[in-house]
Image (cartoon, rainbow, N blue to C red):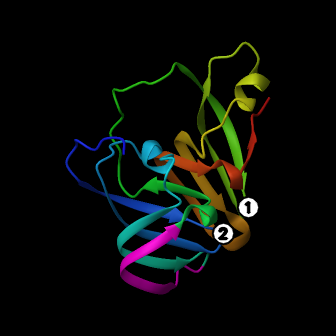
Amino acid sequence: MIGSFNPVQSLPLTVVTPNLIIQGSLRTRVRRLTDVMNEPDLDHLVLFDATFFEVGSRRVVASSSVSQIQFADMLFVHASGPTEPSDEVRTAKQPTRAILLAPPFTIEGQIHLPMEEELGQAVDSLSERFVALTSAKYWAYGVAESPNQVDLLVVNRARAHVAIPV
């Protein structure tokens, strides 16, 4: 596991699926949310003290002390509070304004693409399971979800369409 020498920290998260918004805490030694979500051996998160809300109505449908949330159902995940930027840069990337469509949600923000001569090559090279957006805003007007602004949001690439505006 990446970060196995770091102390365990509790990371408050919001997980969004097509029908649920789940708030809880993840216990992890990994410092970066994108690293947690892209761990190769994981297919779920274990959240503690989780509350499950219906998308749109925000009616509480369940609460639990421990829950297992499957990656396959997640649209995106973000920290439930402010995040501190990491000093660690793994690869040079270019921030690019993007719109991601993860029905029923629309997400706008800065996607961080590899440095390529052509934008199409940079978008084509996205290969991680979850893709990070910074200065992100998400909403789903069709199901009465008002816009939410977050510092960092990671999107399940298998559940989203990436659009780079002209």
- Circle on res. 18: 2
* Image location (x, y in percent) of residue 9: 24, 53
Q: In this view, does 147 lie above or below 88?
A: below
Residue under the point 58% across and 35% down: 110
Nearest the eye: 85 or 48: 48
Q: In this view, does 39 lie above or below 144?
A: above
* Residue 139 picture quarter: bottom right
Q: Is residue 146 left or right of residue 158?
A: left
Look at the image and say whether residue 56 sits in the magenta stretch. Answer: no
- Crowding at dot 2, Cα within 10 Å, few <14 / some 14-19 / many 20+, comes out as some
Secondary structure mostly taken by the magenta-highlighted segment of the chain: strand
Look at the image and say whether residue 65 sits in the magenta stretch. Answer: yes
Residue that badge 1 annotates = 103
Q: In this view, does 34 lie above or below 53?
A: above
* Image location (x, y in percent) of residue 54: 57, 79
* Residue 112 picture quarter: top right
Element class at badge 2:
loop
Nearest the eye: 55 or 36: 36
